[in-house]
Structure formats: C-alpha cells, structure tokens
Image: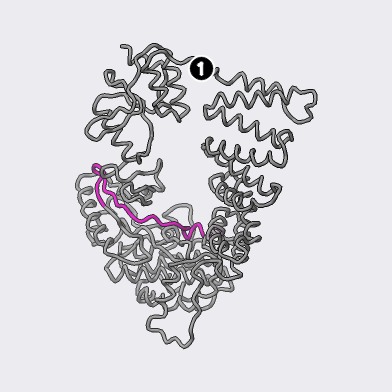
C-alpha cells in the first residue's frame, strides 16, 4: 500500500505502515481535503469468503457504534470506507507517548505514583463511557494508551474489537485469531471466551502494575506460557517490587487482577473513585509533558469542569493567559528550556521559548536578556544536532533583534551567518545567498573586506552564486578572490589553486544571442528565474530547433505550461502558485491529451531535440 491515495486521492499515506498487528494495519496519513493529519486503519481480513463477509459486516456495524462514543479520551472517527476490497477507518491523529514508551523512558523504570493513579483514573473514565454504551475494549494494554503533552490520556484501538456477540467470538477464534494481548488477557478469555466489562478491568490492573513496577505482570517465552500464568499463577503485589506504593493502591491493583470476574471491582466507576484521591503531586515528566510555562487550553477547560457541583469556598487565581505574562515567567521559561535541553529534548525546548517570545517582547525593556541568551544557546544546540529547520528561525529572529551597536557584535554575526547556513543546508540556496550578501555588506562597514572572516564570506557567496546559476557573478567573485590569494602581500588563509579550480568549473558565459527571433523572445519574455530552466533554454536556443510558445494554456481550465511545442505535444512545466492537488490535475490533463509534459529538472536538451525534430 506504499504511496496509496484513498477515496478520490483524499488520504495520502506515509511510505510504510506504523504497525501491523492482529487483524489491523495502521498508517499515518494526511487528509488533503481538510489539510489535517490522520491515522488510517485497515482491516486485514482472514481468507475464506464466508468469514470475510461476516467480518466486513461486523466492521461496518462497529465503526458506527464507535463513532457514537464521544469522549475526550477516545480518538474521533472521521471517515470509513473501502479501498478496493479492504475496509478502512480514518481516525484522529494523537500526539504523545504511549504508556509503554513512557515507562521505558523513566530513569528508574517506574512512573511517579501520582501519575500512575492519574493515568489510571482517566482510563477508568473512558471505560465507564464505553461500558455504558455496551462496548468492551478487549485489548487494553500500555501500548494502547497514550499520554498527550498536556496530561490527558487517550485510549486507542477500539477500532476492531468492540461490541462482540457470542457468534463473533466463536467464529473468530475458530479462525485462529487471538482477541487481545496475552500479557493483559483474563483467565476467562482464555478458558471460555467470555467477554464482558470485567476483562477490561483486569487489563487495567495489568497496566497499573506495569506502570508501578516497570515490568509486565507476567513474562514468558511464548504466548502459551503467558496464558498458563494468567490462568494459574497468583499475581505478585506491586508493593513487593516497589515498597513505597500506598497500601490502598496495592490492594486496588490486586483486586483488579482477581482470577474470577465477579471478585473484581463492580465497575470502572468504582476503580475511578479509588484512584482519584491518589492522583496528587503531578509534577513534570520531561519529554512527555509540556512544561508549566506553556499555556494549556485543555487544562483551562478541565479546571472549570472540576468545579461543577463542587462547594467552593475560596477564589482560585486563574493561570496566566499567556506564558511569560507574569514578570517572572521569562525566567521560568528559560529554566524549563534548560531542563529539556539536559534531557535531550531540543524540539520541546524550542516550543517553550517560542511561546515565551511574544510576552517577552511586551515587557518594559522590550528584549529580555535571559530569554535572548537561552534562545541563542538552544539554536546552537539545534544547529550542532543538524536540526537546521528548527535552528534557522531562532537565529534569524535573534539576528534581527540584535543590531543597534556601532560595531557588529560577535553574537549578531554568528546569528545572521548561521541563519544563512541553515537556509543553504535546507536547499534554499537563493535565500542563503541573499542573507550572506546582506551580512557581507554590513560587515564591510566596520571591518573591511580583507580579513579572514570577510574573505570566507566572499568564498561562500561565490559558491552560492555558482549553485544558483549566477555564473557571471560567481566568476567575478572568484576572480577577485584569486587576486587576493596571489598577492605577494597575502597574509590570509586563501588557497589560490582551489580558487583556480572553482573558476575552471564555472560554465562559460554565453555572450552571443540566438539569431532566431522566436528564441530571442523566449530569452526576453519567459520566466527563467529557475536556474535549471535557464540552463536548459540556453542549451536549446543554439540547437537550431523551432522556438517554443511562451505561456501555453491547455483546455478549458487553461492549465499553463511555461514553454510548449504544441505540434509535438512537448512542454516544460513550472510549479508556479499551484497547490498539490492542482498540480496533479494539471499533469493528468496533459497526460490524457497525449503530451509529454515535465518540469525542467526532468528534461535534458537532447530529449527535447529528438521530440521536436521527428
């Protein structure tokens, strides 16, 4: 399914599936119509015509039921359909960490007890809603629970295992499909295929145990070995592995892990009531949660809900609407940034500083020195980590804010220089060239053009001129540098042989214009700002072939080709201002009409000559 587009090319999938487990295949994708990230889940139907039809009907029924399960802890369903014969479901993309990854990332392998209780309470809220709608998850486990950056929990994978009937279970188990994950499956599932809300409570106990201890409840070399332990082995108490676990939490986990479903808590609501009082001291989880200096509309919303029907005797101070609005918040943002940097999370640190930037600009002195210092440090770390796309805007903003001194400071020079280098390293060489030329002009005012730094700038400007097709300018730059390198007074680090090689690599400048009036018009009026197109036209204009039409339009839609030979149905296309879908429609129109229409980068002069002379 690589590169697949679904439903009239609406959903564009990543190159590889995110996961392939059991009866499902999960892909990250993009909804081109609504311009949003999505998750697309395909149902992998076992072979056999009767079974396929049965599972397809059940899939359609279940997707309808899930769509009606509206809860903030359940990803929304956006769409369902078929790709050929394969059913699929389009769901909300959730950002965050799975509980399995969160536990693995902890220094000692265990989560803070308050967070274990808080995550468990949120899972109970989701289960209460699901069980109230007659749904059973059947595969609750740490990999199917995700913690979002603002602290909320999403329970995943309701998609293919809900609202089962006895006939469903009998039929699917006959096909050899295991409904659930052995590490979290109940004894009754393995012994008699029973399926009710109690199996989700047992899985909740397994999940709480793993969060508390950092290890699964049972382990075994094979699924069968795990199943035997789930049926026969008594569960170890969490306190035996972690003595600081509160007695009431230890007892709750053991009650959820009872072998008989009737011995477990009566409902998810009952487990919630026991977990909620333990959900305290919910401090930072570096790399998993946004830090306190970042605003959270979701927590603002929840802060109101917890006061509904509550007897409130004190007025609570609302959180600042923007991080940094309080006088001390820029300093707190810097501290948060350094914590994230120490834990090797530069991207999250960049988000913290980006959110703090606007309020810092509102402050009395307009520019907060601590914020500037933290941003400069972060940009340097991102640059060293080759994360040029994130480093560039930080360097660029700092470079714009710093000027004002009579002499360019070292920090200003570094910010402007690295902003240009970041642009070059992300394939935006013309932007990089403009920035370096501007930096060089300002540097000359106070430092002249013969020190090592100025010459290094000129060397890099010449390279970018060559890369962007400005051959005449590149020749002038390298010729001037060669004069400095060959001067007997040369006391700077310039390699004359290297510069001579660079000059030799520059294509000869074509001084003569083609005599054909049609080609003269092409050179005069066509948009040749793309150096690839410019070089292609220069090569074609001397071949003696017919000149193309400029700005040819195809069909009633007027799909534009920059240059075209209509008799030979050959065209050179440009990107222009078209979006992705418009580009697809344009190229399709030319294909249907029998044209060979390509961007300049996919043509060479010999190919075009062969087409327009035969």
Residue 148 visible to an observer of this rendering? yes
Residue 360 percent coordinates (x, y): 58, 63
Read off the residue under disc 1.
Answer: 510
Front-most of residues 59 and 558: 558
Front-most of residues 602 and 366: 366
Residue beneath the point at 40% across and 63% down: 154
- Residue 338's image quarter? bottom right
Q: Quadrant of the C terminus?
A: top left
Count all numbered tags in the image, as a single digit.
1
- Residue 155's image quarter? bottom left
Front-most of residues 223 and 113: 113
Eyeballing the image, is 432 above or below 117? Answer: above
Q: Residues within 10 Å of mark 1 (few under 14, many from 20)?
A: few
Q: Determine whether, in the image, residue 173 is placed left or right of residue 352.
A: left
Residue 78 percent coordinates (x, y): 30, 55
Residue 150 percent coordinates (x, y): 47, 64
- Residue 85's image quarter? top left
Q: Quadrant of the N terminus?
A: top left
Eyeballing the image, is 503 above or below 24? Answer: above
Q: Determine whether, in the image, residue 442 is placed left or right of residue 352.
A: right
Q: Determine whether, in the image, residue 182 is placed left or right of residue 131.
A: right
Q: Determine whether, in the image, residue 599 is placed left or right of residue 403.
A: left
Q: Is residue 90 magenta?
A: yes
Residue 82 percent coordinates (x, y): 24, 46
Does dot 1 land on a helix, a strand or a loop?
loop
Residue beneath the point at 63% across and 27% down: 477
Eyeballing the image, is 60 above or below 152? Answer: above
Question: Magenta residues?
Answer: 80-105
């Amino acid at each position: 399914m690589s590169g697949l587009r679904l439903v009239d090319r609406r959903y564009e999938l990543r190159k590889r599936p995110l996961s392939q487990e059991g009866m499902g295949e999960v892909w990250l994708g993009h909804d081109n119509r609504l311009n949003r990230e999505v998750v697309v889940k395909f149902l992998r139907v076992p072979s056999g015509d009767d079974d396929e039809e049965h599972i397809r009907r059940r899939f359609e029924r279940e997707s309808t039921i899930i769509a009606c399960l509206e809860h903030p802890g359940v990803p929304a369903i956006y769409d369902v359909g078929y790709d050929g014969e394969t059913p699929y479901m389009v769901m909300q993309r959730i950002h965050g960490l799975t509980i399995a990854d969160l536990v693995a990332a902890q220094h000692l392998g265990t989560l803070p007890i308050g967070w274990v209780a808080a995550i468990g309470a949120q899972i109970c809220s989701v289960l209460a809603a699901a069980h109230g709608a007659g749904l059973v998850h059947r595969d609750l486990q740490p990999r199917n629970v995700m913690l979002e950056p603002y602290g909320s929990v999403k329970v995943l994978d309701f998609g293919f295992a809900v609202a089962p009937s006895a006939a469903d279970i009998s039929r699917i188990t006959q096909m050899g499909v295991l409904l659930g994950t052995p590490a979290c499956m109940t004894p009754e599932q393995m012994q008699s295929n029973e399926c009710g809300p109690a199996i989700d409570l047992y899985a909740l106990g397994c999940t709480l145990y793993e969060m508390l201890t950092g290890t699964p409840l049972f382990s075994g070399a094979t699924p069968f070995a795990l199943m035997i332990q789930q049926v026969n082995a008594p569960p170890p108490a969490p306190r035996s592995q972690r003595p600081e676990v509160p007695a009431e939490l230890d007892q709750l986990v053991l009650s959820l892990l009872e072998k008989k479903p009737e011995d477990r808590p009566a409902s998810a609501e009952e487990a919630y009531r026991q977990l909620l009082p333990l959900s305290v001291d919910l401090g930072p989880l570096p790399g998993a949660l946004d830090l306190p200096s970042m605003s959270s509309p979701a927590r603002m919303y929840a802060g109101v809900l917890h006061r509904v029907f509550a007897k409130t005797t004190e007025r609570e101070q609302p959180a600042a609407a923007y991080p940094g609005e309080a006088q001390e918040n820029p300093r707190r943002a810097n501290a948060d940034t350094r914590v994230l940097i120490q834990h090797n999370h530069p991207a999250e640190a960049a988000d913290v500083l980006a959110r703090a930037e606007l309020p810092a600009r509102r402050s009395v002195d307009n520019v907060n020195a601590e914020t500037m210092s933290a941003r400069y440090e972060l940009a340097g770390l991102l640059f060293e980590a080759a994360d040029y796309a994130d480093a560039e805007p930080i360097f660029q903003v700092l470079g714009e804010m710093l000027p004002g001194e009579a002499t360019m400071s070292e920090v200003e020079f570094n910010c402007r220089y690295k902003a240009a280098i970041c642009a070059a390293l992300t394939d935006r060489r013309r932007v990089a060239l403009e920035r370096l030329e501007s930096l060089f002009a300002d540097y000359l005012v106070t430092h002249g053009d013969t020190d090592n730094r100025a010459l290094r700038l000129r060397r890099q400007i010449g390279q970018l001129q060559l890369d962007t097709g400005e051959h005449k300018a590149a020749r002038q730059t390298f010729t001037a540098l060669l004069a400095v390198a060959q001067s007997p007074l040369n006391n700077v680090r310039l390699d004359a042989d290297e510069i001579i090689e660079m000059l030799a690599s520059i294509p000869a400048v074509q001084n003569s214009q083609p005599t054909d009036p049609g080609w003269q018009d092409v050179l005069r009026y066509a948009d040749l700002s793309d150096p690839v197109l410019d070089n292609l036209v220069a090569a074609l204009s001397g071949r003696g072939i017919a000149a193309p039409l400029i700005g040819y339009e195809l069909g009633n839609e007027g799909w534009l080709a920059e240059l075209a030979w209509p008799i030979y149905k050959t065209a050179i296309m440009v990107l222009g201002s078209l979006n992705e879908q418009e580009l697809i429609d344009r190229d399709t129109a030319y294909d249907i009409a029998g044209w060979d229409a390509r961007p300049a980068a996919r043509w060479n002069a010999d190919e075009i000559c062969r087409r327009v002379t035969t």
